[in-house]
Image (cartoon, rainbow, N blue to C red):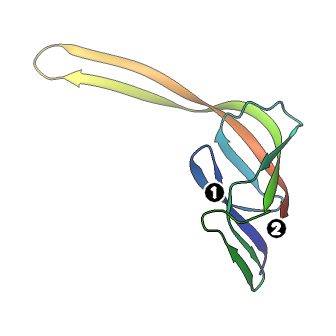
Amino acid sequence: MSKYAIIQLQGKQLRVSENDKVIVDRVETEPGKILEVSEVLLVVDGDQRQIGQPLVAGAKVSLKVESHGQGEKLRVFKYKSKSRYRRTQGHRQQQSTLTVAKIAA
């Protein structure tokens, strides 16, 4: 079995392993910098499990910020029948690509 962790980042929970690439909402860290996440909920290393209540004490996950970009374009369409009301709007979410550098438990 491999080593993985469940972390909480920006109010969302993610399952990450070392060398994984993760796409999340934009983080305010420059590309090339390391982002330390200490909100680790679970760490599994082979047969050993560390379960946090609510967090695992002393556990950290290092994430390297690879790039910033935008997600797929979404079309938002509002429509009301019998009143000739139609509105179309587009949206592209700001995103960051992160690589999991190290899981320390």
Looking at the rendered structure, the kind of residue marked 2 is: Ala
- Tally the marks: 2
Report the quarter where the C terminus lies. bottom right
Is disc 2 surrounded by few (<14), some (14 to 19) or many (20+) residues within 10 Å? some
**What x and y, as percent, mark residue 19?**
83, 58
Residue 51 image-quadrant placement: bottom right
23 versus 86 height, above or below: below
Q: Residue furthest right?
A: 32
Report the quarter where the N terminus lies. bottom right
**Mark 1 lies on residue:** 14
What is the secondary structure assignment of the residue under circle 2?
loop
Q: Residue at x 14, y 23 (%)?
A: 81
What is the secondary structure assignment of the residue under circle 1?
strand
**Mark 2 lies on residue:** 105
Q: Nearer the viewer, residue 70 or 105?
A: 105
Residue 78 image-quadrant placement: top left
